Amino acid sequence: MGGVVSVVPATADRFDDVSLVLGPKRPDATVCWCLSHRLSAKDNRALVGQARGQYVRQLCGGSISPGVLAYVDGQAAGWAAVGPRSQTTFARSPKIPHLDDLDVWAIWCVSVLARFRHHGLAVELIRGAASYARSQGAPAVEGYPTDNAGERVNTVMSYVGTKTMFEQAGFHQAAQTDSVAGGFPRVIMRLGFAAV
């Protein structure tokens, strides 16, 4: 890629960079802000405009960061959402099964700003998110990417990542799912952490 890459938790003092990566061009616009899998459908619909960014700002000030940011030479370049699966809509998903009773964490969104794409930054974000999960005591972390077999994924649906990205970050395929994104089946990729 060129340049020095660092991946760090998205904390309150880095909210402006979170906003740069996730926020809208117009402050009052209603965009995802990576909340669609963090909130119930009802709460997600009710939270509009600037209230969405304020909600994420509060999350960044909490004891558990809502995700990680990637920087390239000090410039904010990407984001990955990570947190306990039990605190996401995946906890109740009928299409993405629970593999066991472990209190796993999930990585469900990987976003890289356009000018930083195609240099492996998504893989670094996945590694960084997994490392953060481990630092917070997660026994394992999962992702639910597409198994696109090398075919191009629609940009709108690419936030889920691809099986190859997760493999490059050290994950293994743990199961198939009944979920589809961008026309491709999604799989459960998992990275377990050995007890120390």
Image (cartoon, rainbow, N blue to C red):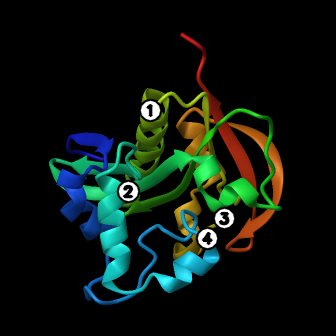
Residue 169, how many percent across, how many down? 53, 37
Report if residue 105 is visible in the image: yes
Residue under pointer 1: 131
- Cα distance in 3D space between marks 3 and 2: 23 Å
187 to the left or right of 133: right
Point out the frontmost of discs 4 and 2: 4
Q: In the figure, residue 84 lies in which quadrant? A: top right
Residue 62, how many percent across, how many down? 34, 49
Residue under pointer 3: 151
Label located before the other in sequence (3 or 2): 2
Q: What SS does tag 4 mark?
A: loop
40 to the left or right of 25: right
Residue under pointer 2: 79
Q: Residues within 10 Å of mark 1 (few under 14, many from 20)?
A: some
- Cα distance in 3D space between marks 3 and 1: 29 Å
The amino acid pointed to by label 4 is: Ser
Label located before the other in sequence (4 or 3): 4
Disc on res. 40: 4
Q: What SS does tag 3 mark?
A: loop
Q: What SS does tag 2 mark?
A: strand
- Looking at the image, which residue is at 58% across and 44% down? 166
Point out the frontmost of discs 4 and 1: 4
Q: Nearer the viewer, residue 166 or 102?
A: 102
Label located before the other in sequence (4 or 1): 4
- Cα distance in 3D space between marks 4 and 3: 32 Å
